[in-house]
Image (tube, rainbow, N blue to C red):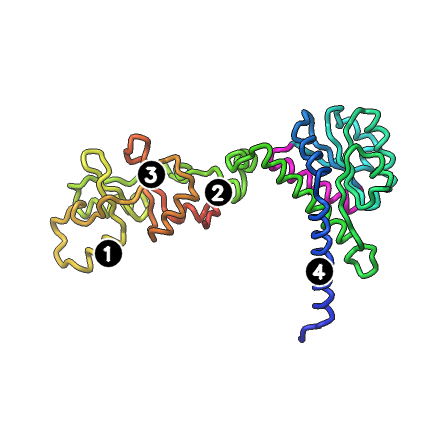
Amino acid sequence: MTDNPNVTEIARNIIRLEALSLKSLEESIGSDFEQVVQLIHQSQGKVVITGVGKSGIIAMKIAASLSSTGTPAFCLHATDATHGDLGIVEKRDVVIGISKSGNSQEIKDLIPFLKNNGNTVIGMTANPKSYLGKKSDYLLYTPVDKEACPHNLAPTTSTTVQLVMGDALAMSLMDLNGFKSQDFAQIHPSGSLGKKLHLKVVDLMDDSKIPRVSISDTLKEVIYEISEKRLGATVVEDNGKLSGLVTDGDIRRVLEKNENINGLLASDIMTNNPISVTEDTLALDGLKLMQAKNINHLIVSGEDKNYKGMVHILDFIKEGLNG
């Protein structure tokens, strides 16, 4: 099968047209955008985002982006709004209506109610002279010369510009709200993203598998402990204090180098001053340390620097963490 140069050119032209529209959007950002951001930032209510068709789908994404970055928001489909769902809109809420033409009938039906309800209305449209453009208290201009669709019909360029405008709103508000990675973690507890932000090494430990031997324990006792706890290593303690680490790799090397292993103790084969982290270390930071040091085991210590447990590289992989 050979490449079709016509298809390639069509795709590149679509991307080119949408990129040009984003350039126009960038140049249009000014005082109106700043006023909208400040209005939402100072609002005591939620942000309600509404639209129909493809604009309604964009409204859903923008609402999700706002909510996940510290600005409470939800999407209300314009058709549903005028068929009984308006009760969810409170007087203190800020409403963003999205419509390329600005003359969608569903939006036109909705705005009078919002005005009577005392809501501040923000219009996001490519047509400032439209019904939405004129009736809105504030305007977010989303310029579109033409859709990337060959027939200038299917929403393509317009929805891309709306989506990026939403991202600009969400990220600007995120900055104003002082929303940090710790805050992000609180509302993203699941999935790899949440785990990277809040999961700690202590959360990966299995309390039933805390291998430990004394420096005076024999090689046989060391092997037994490693086999029993199934972590491939054991900590060596001296009077209850962390002293060293013995891995199954250390044992193999000892067996290869010594014909007579009778009399060997844990202290003879351990690695002194093994790498350890405190229990409040983020799992992602612990993984990065292990990768940098090329080790498979990480010792976890408490605030008193006493040995708390051990995690294996596979524990991170099981949690979907890969750095």
Amino acid type for the residue under numbered disc 4? Arg
What span is colored magenta in the figure? 52-71
How crowded pointer 3 is (Cα within 10 Å; few <14, some 14-19, many 20+) is rated as many
- In this picture, residue 173 sits left or right of residue 321: right
Amino acid type for the residue under numbered disc 1? Arg
Q: Are marks 3 and 4 in contact (CB under 8 Å)?
A: no
In percent of width and height, residue 285 lies at 41, 43
How crowded pointer 2 is (Cα within 10 Å; few <14, some 14-19, many 20+) is rated as many
Q: Earlier in the sequence, mark 4 or mark 1?
A: 4
Please say whether residue 57 is one of the residues in the magenta stretch: yes
As drawn, the label of residue 252 is: 1
As drawn, the label of residue 196 is: 2
Q: Quadrant of residue 89?
A: top right
Q: In the image shown, does 116 or 40 lie closer to the viewer?
A: 40
As drawn, the label of residue 300 is: 3
Name the mark nearer the viewer: 1 or 3: 3
Residue 185 visible at all: yes
Residue reaching furthest to the bottom: 2
In percent of width and height, residue 317 lies at 44, 49
Q: Earlier in the sequence, mark 1 or mark 3?
A: 1
Tag 2 secondary structure:
helix
Name the residue that disc number 4 marks.
Answer: 16
Name the mark nearer the viewer: 4 or 1: 4
Q: CA distance from mark 4 to mark 1?
A: 60 Å
